[in-house]
Image (cartoon, grey):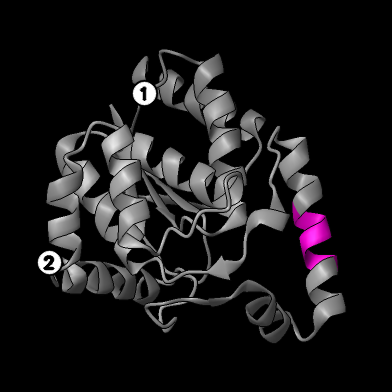
Amino acid sequence: MVKLDILSDPICPWCYIGKAQLDRALEAEPDHPFAVEWHPFQLNPDMPAEGMDRRSYLEAKFGGKEAAAETYAEIDAHARAAGLEIDWSRIDRTPSTLDAHRLIHWAGIEGCQTAIVSALFRAYFQEGRDIGRHEVLADIADARGMDASVVLRLLATDEDREEIAGRDAAAREMGVTGVPTFIVARQHAVPGAQPPELWRKVIGEIREKGHE
């Protein structure tokens, strides 16, 4: 197997698109060599724990309502091309994702990391759920076979907060400035939401090397 490390944030639309395109490639290549692991990168590491109004956040980030609308029109077009229907109207708040990343970390220990990542993307982008809320995270965990009561208990503590913050900081020190960022075999960084064709080409090249 070849390690595929993915740095991502569950409120990043490009990460959602990038995962959808990678999924299409892996579905087309069911005997692919990748062992996938997800890693934390917060788009907004200084976001208050309670999050903030999404409209205010976007207008501040992109310099006004018009610029934000233009940016998200482009993102929506790319999402649709990737087969995703994002319901922007249901997203009221931009949450802190620190606790979501803690859940992803715990899901990795339990062997259901990709399922939790998928569920977080769906909850935020399609259902408009606030994935900064502990009850929402526990419900997502429960639906994917994790113990909701344990997750709630852990979320109420500082368990693994420093771990997540440290891994996020380490990624930035390595030079990662945006997500998604994919790292193949711990050597080759592939930034951005790449088309399925690129991933199928990478898989083909890995196979060829394996037969040399």
Q: Name the residue under label 2.
A: 159
Q: Is residue 90 above or below residue 108?
A: below
Q: Percent x, y for residue 37?
A: 31, 43
Q: Does the magenta stretch include residue 146?
A: no
Which residue sits at x=39%, y=74%? Answer: 172
**Could you tell me which residue is drawn at 77 percent across and 62 percent down?**
72
Q: Which of 182 and 115 is in front in this view?
A: 115
Specify few, some or many for label 1: CA neighbours under 10 Å numbering under 14, 14-19, or 20 or more: some
Q: In this view, does 143 lie to the left or right of 67?
A: left
Q: What residue type is labelled 2?
A: Glu
Find the magenta span and give its range.
70-75
Tell which of 197 and 99 is nearer to you.
99
Q: Can residue 211 be seen in this view?
A: yes
**Depth check: 23 or 120 in front?**
120
Give how far across and how far down residue 144 sits, in percent: 30, 33
Q: In which quarter of the image is residue 131?
A: bottom left
Q: Can residue 185 be seen from the camera position used here?
A: no
Q: Is mark 2 on a helix, strand or loop?
A: loop
Check residue 72 for magenta coloring. Answer: yes
Quarter of the image where one finds residue 85: top right
Q: To which residue does mark 1 refer? A: 33
